[in-house]
Image (spheres, rainbow, N blue to C red):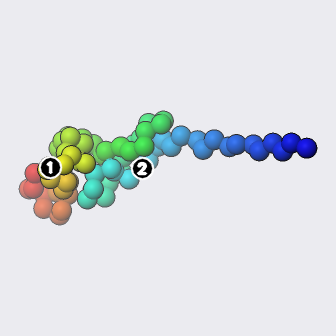
Amino acid sequence: MTSRTATKKKPTQSGYVPCACRDCMEIAIAGPGEKKAYCAACEEAGCPDHQGVAGMSQECRAPGAYGDDDAC
């Protein structure tokens, strides 16, 4: 007797996801198959270029990320 196990593939996540920037609390839109996405403010501030890079600041660079609207 052989048993068959049906494998279910998990659908690729797309849609609204938390921003991948470490300290950001905004929502981002991920495309199909994307594991992470950055919100528009983080994209504009250059956060994706620094997140996870050794020796670089990991803080969110988007204006107002820490409550100060004049921050950069």
* Residue located at (9% from left, 56% from top): 71
- Badge 2 element: strand
The residue pinned by badge 1 equals 56
Residue farthest along the bottom direction in this orientation = 67
Query: In this rendering, would 44 be left or right of 39?
Result: left
Crowd band around label 1 with a 10 angstrom C-alpha radius: few (<14), some (14–19), many (20+)? few
Residue type, label 1: Met
On the image, numbered disc 2 is attached to which residue?
17
Q: Amino acid at mark 2?
A: Val
Task: Name the one closer to the observer, 56 or 44.
Answer: 56
Quadrant of res 1: top right
Describe residue 35's horizontal placement relative to residue 64 as left or right: right
Residue at 25% over, 48% down: 52
Residue 59, given in percent of the width and then of the height, sits at: 18, 56
Point out which mark residue 42 bears.
none
Q: Secondary structure at mark 1?
A: loop
Q: CA distance from mark 2 to mark 1?
A: 24 Å
Regarding residue 61, the answer to whether it shows in the image is: no
